[in-house]
Amino acid sequence: MPDYAVVGKGVPKLDASAKSNGQSQYIADMSFPNMLHGKILRSPYPHAKILNVDVSQAKALRGVKAVITGKDILPVKFGIVPFAADQHALCIGKVRHPGDSVAAVAAVDEDTAEEALSLIKVEYELLPAVFDPEEAMKPGAPIIHEGVENNTSARMLKNFGDVDQAFRESDVIREDRYRTQPNNHAPLEPHGCISIWHPENKVTIRCSTQIPFFLRRNLAKAVGLEEKDVRVIKTIVGGGFGQKIDMFASDVCATLLSKMTCRPVKIVINREEVFLSTRQRHPMIITVKTGAKKDGTFTAQDFKLIADGGGYNSTAPLVITASVYFLMIPYILKNLRYEGCHVYTNKPVGGAMRGHGIPQVRFAVESNLDNLANELGIDPVDLRMKNALYVGYKHPAKYRINTCGFKDALTKTADAIDWKAKKGTGIGIAGSSFPCGPKNMSHIGAGAIVEINIDGGVNILSGAADIGQGTETVLAQIAAEEMGVKYESVRVTAADTGITPLDAGTFGSGVTFRAGNAMRAAAEDARRQLQEVVADKLEAKADDIVFRDERVYVKGSPDKGIDFAEAIKYYRYLDKPMPIVGRGFYMPDSAEPTTLLKEDGNFSVAYTFIAQAAEVKVDRETGQVELETIATAHDCGFMLNPLNVEGQLEGSVAGGVGMAFYEDLPHVDGEYLNANLIDYRMPTSLEIPKKIISIPIETVEPLGPFGAKESGEGNQVATAPAIANAVYDAVGVHINELPLTPERVLRAMEENSGRAR
């Protein structure tokens, strides 16, 4: 597909900046000749019929080149999960939350586009709205999506073992109810894209996305093209954390406006739009009941979850699936009953955020376990050790546990925090686990290409999307290790659907697993082609040829060899085709999350295991909590890049601290009161723990590239419950709602004091 900026009436003009793979800069900094700027008009109301949209004045404004409404788009619903798709790029018929998209304009500059939005007249008929998911489920509640009973768009029931009988055999049963709050990902870079509709009815879109190939599929459907006619180029992404997995109105609107104007169209949304119109971590209402024997052996668990999804589905089926399957790990739990519901409300939309539903449920479970330990008179660490999962355990949900360092993680975390000496002074512990790249619907694998050029340089191509976690660094390391060349010799081209092989995208901590295994296979393929030629020259067997330190030599005889560059010249001397091209593909042997709604199965190829301990000081006069230390032990397999792992673990802890103490989105009629980076509180360097102790637990995973597993995302899951349990240890009462504000801590202490009297 030619890649050029379009000027005038479809006359192509080549643009040098458009020839790169798009990874040299952020969207906000990019520009094309004759580029237009787009803006989206958003609803101020949580729930309303759209009676009429008058765009005549906006179209008449000088500098405005196009205006579109719901009448101008294909009535195609989109969503990250195809069977749950329920959203239009521009609303057709009604709006379902503040910030819902109603119309879009393209103009010669941003100021003109903003002015045009103010000239669009929308006639609304206000409808009753509902903001609490429990209220939304009641008969007679406002209907947000027609045909959806009780506003429950996804429901999952699971039953393992005989829960009722297990409860009857329990010595202690503890039941608690918890609430978690919405969190916004708040990436430093807001969402943006530049779309170019080519005269031959093809599209090139540059955007900040985590899943280029999924976006290609969804955008093609939304604008009426085939996938082969859409090229998605991921630019540098200034933070994602799951928020840049979905397709958004900006992607579709920029594309359609480009089609109408025959010019590139750029849309970069503002900070308030990030909060109101993208995605957030699902707030949840959770009831958990756990039974145990006197010795602490878990007998059964009954779990009810209500996820507040806001106005649309996004990842609805996936979030309630991930929630239940990670109730059954990292502990042995043979009897489980689960009911999970995803419920529509007239608030901004819930979606994937770091941990994707698992941080919420583990906050509930780990808090409940500390209450259970107290009633049993068992130390919380000992309770977890007794029930810890192990390799070879026959899992009721059909998991396959190849490696598990959970007991080591618990022991080393407790030692690092000085558990035995400090228990009762404000320390808490929590366990968690995480997948290493589950399958995800149709795009389930990863491909890779390795090219060895005549000059000895190595080019690698991968569809994997680096969003700051170091994907391209690790892939280059893997290729360099397999080829025996310097890391600096490897050049990476990634995440461009026009030139790179298929990749599922960045989600579920599966990038290193999927793309890393594919890259290793591709490098092995390329090396094998060169290996056979060198073996002939060195009069050895091909399997005995070693590639290391820029040399190619016979195993056991380092002196019997040649430099890597000389090997390339010899290969070329024999008139072999150049470049040498190696190909690799990897598809995880795991169950798709969408099928788990009906059947059990191995959720992931491998699993990581995490334990975290927190130490806090609580001011009993004010309820203020000071976080002293976090110790985190993460079973991450073999560390491909130890410095990167350490950075991921510490960054993940910082995000968990935000969930525990600061991040929340209070609203009035569905509209957030703090939709900006001034009022939305996130931890800075002053709020993170004074001391973070990172403890990698290395277990060599046989299915991972060089034995690697996930590191980082799963680590955040344990932070909030570890802190909540530390506060419990300090003040003697659990706060069952996040965030742990001073007001909530003080109120809990006062209520507990009243009960004691």
Image (cartoon, grey):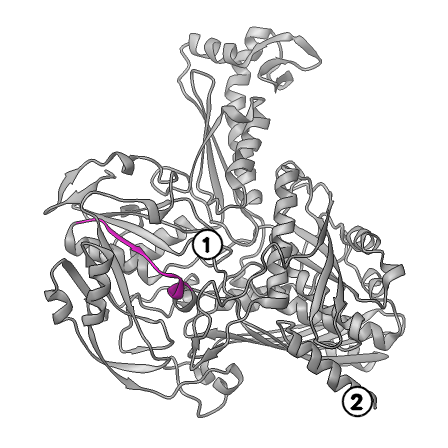
User: SS at mark 2?
Assistant: helix
Residue 188, numbered circle: 1
Q: Quadrant of the C terminus?
A: bottom right
Q: Nearer the viewer, residue 214 or 117?
A: 117
Residue 5 image label: none
Q: Give the amino acid at mark 2.
A: Arg
Q: Is residue 355 left or right of residue 753?
A: left
Q: Is residue 273 magenta?
A: yes
Q: Is residue 110 above or below residue 639?
A: below
The location of residue 125, given as percent across then percent down, is 27, 86
Is 645 on the left-hand or right-hand side of 676?
right
Q: Give the image location of residue 738, x and y in percent.
A: 62, 73
Residue 755 circle label: 2
Give the residue displayed 86% in from the left and 79% down from the top. 171
The part of the chain drawn in magenta is 263-274
Label 1 secondary element: loop
Neighbour tally class for label 2: few under 14, some 14-19, many 20 plus, Cα within 10 Å: few
Q: x, y percentage for residue 576?
A: 42, 14
Q: Quadrant of the N terminus?
A: top left
Residue 324 visible in the current orientation = no
